[in-house]
Each structure stands twice: as structure tokens, then as C-alpha cells.
């Protein structure tokens, strides 16, 4: 990064760089069960219309964050799942923290009262980031899915808003 890191709304034209960052995460083997990036149309349909963010410096993206609904049932309308991905060369530079703080702010501005995140226990950096931003561990989902023929656990974290749904 050369200039100032700006957190901005993700635009369809950002997809190629967003996809590359996602593919870097997939390649680590500890970011997601997914093995390939979706098309823009698939990604767009799977994520909420608000709180789609990128970390940008001089046109280059260094990370992205977005929310997905956890259920179509109206009772869970204020609950969303968090995705935060940072390019390999930008990890441990505060990019993820800036994105996650902005994502939390936008989620609350849009009526989200609970954010949840699931991650592999080996993803210690992401676990630490989420905990530092107010997420708490709900539990460990043992052998929740197979990856390359090996059963994997995930850690489920959540963050309850202190401004939405507090009545």
C-alpha cells in the first residue's frame, strides 16, 4: 500500500480483484470449504445488497468484506454471516480490522442485530481479528464437513449489536 487505504462500496467492476483475493483465501486451505470462486452473478445473488465493502488504495484492492443472510425466515432477518478476505501480501497490516469495523457499522445501520462467522480453528489470525472486534465463541462444530476427504471442524462466533435490537 502506498497511499491511504479507503474502505468503499464494492462495485461489480471490482469483481475480478475480489475474486483473486477470494482465490488466495481458498488456496490457503483454511479460509473456506469452497474449492472454486463463483461467478459474479452467483456471488451477487448470495450476498446482502448492503455492507459489500472493499479496501482500496490507488485502484488496487487489498481486501473485501460482505454479508450473507443466514436464513430466509423473517425471524432471522437481523442475522447475517460475515465474510472477510484480505490479500496474502496485506495480511497483518490492519486491512481486515478496518474492513470488519466498517462492516459492523454498515450492518447496524441496516438493522442487523447479530453477526455470525464460522471459521476453521487453524485460521488463528481470523479468529483473533473477530474476537478483537467483539465476537465471542459460541462453540465448535466438530466434523461439520469434509475437505479433500478429511473431516474439518469449524468455530462459530457471533457478535450481538449494542445498538440494534436492544429494546
Image: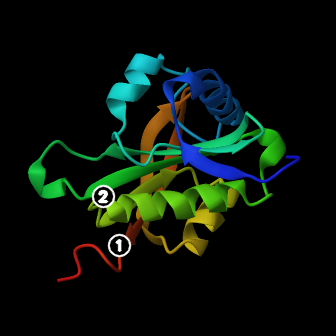
Are the residues at dot 2 and dot 1 in contact (C-beta closer than 8 Å)? no
- Occupied quadrant, residue 14: top right
Badge 2: few (under 14), some or many (20 or more) residues near its Cα, within 10 Å?
Answer: few
**As drawn, 41 above or below 79:** above
Instruction: Residue 41 in the image: state x and y as whole percent.
Output: 40, 18
Quick one: which residue is furthest to the bottom in this view? Answer: 167
Q: Is residue 23 visible?
A: yes
Q: Pointer 1: what residue? A: 160
**Alpha carbons under labels 2 and 1: distance apart:** 14 Å
Mark 2 vs mark 1: in front: 2
Residue highlighted by disc 2: 110
Which residue is nearer to you in this view: 103 or 120?
103
Q: Nearer the viewer, residue 21 or 58?
A: 58
- SS assignment at label 1: strand
Badge 2 element:
loop
Task: State left or right for residue 93 relative to residue 7.
Answer: right
Place of residue 152 in the rendered image (x, y in percent of width and height, measured from the top left): 52, 43
Image location of residue 67, percent across then percent down: 40, 46
The one of 156 and 167 positioned closer to us in this rendering: 167
Q: How many numbered circles does the render carry?
A: 2
Position of 158 relative to 22 (above/below): below
Q: How is the image coloured?
A: rainbow
- Looking at the image, which residue is at 52% across and 37% down? 10
For the C terminus, the quadrant is bottom left
Could you tell me which residue is drawn at 35 percent across and 80 percent down? 162
In the picture provided, is 83 more to the left or to the right than 72?
right
* In the image: residue 147, left or right of residue 42: right
Q: Residue at x 77, y 50 (%)?
A: 91
Q: Which mark is residue 152?
A: none
In percent of width and height, residue 59 lies at: 73, 33
Q: In which quarter of the image is residue 125?
A: bottom right
Amino acid at each position: 500500500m502506498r497511499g491511504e487505504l479507503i474502505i468503499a462500496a464494492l462495485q461489480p467492476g471490482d469483481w475480478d480483484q475480489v475474486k483473486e483475493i477470494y482465490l488466495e483465501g481458498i488456496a490457503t486451505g483454511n479460509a473456506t470449504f469452497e474449492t472454486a470462486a463463483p461467478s459474479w452473478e452467483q456471488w451477487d445473488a448470495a450476498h446482502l445488497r448492503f455492507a459489500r465493502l472493499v479496501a482500496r488504495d490507488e485502484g488496487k484492492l487489498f481486501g473485501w468484506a460482505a454479508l450473507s443472510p443466514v436464513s430466509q425466515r423473517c425471524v432471522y432477518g437481523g442475522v447475517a454471516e460475515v465474510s472477510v478476505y484480505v490479500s496474502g501480501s496485506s495480511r497483518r497490516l490492519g486491512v481486515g480490522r478496518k474492513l470488519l469495523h466498517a462492516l459492523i457499522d454498515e450492518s447496524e445501520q441496516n438493522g442487523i442485530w447479530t453477526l455470525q462467522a464460522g471459521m476453521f480453528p487453524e485460521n488463528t489470525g481470523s479468529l483473533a481479528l473477530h474476537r478483537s472486534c467483539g465476537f465471542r465463541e459460541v462453540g465448535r462444530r466438530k466434523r461439520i464437513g469434509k475437505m479433500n476427504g478429511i473431516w474439518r471442524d469449524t468455530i462459530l462466533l457471533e457478535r450481538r449489536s449494542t445498538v440494534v435490537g436492544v429494546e
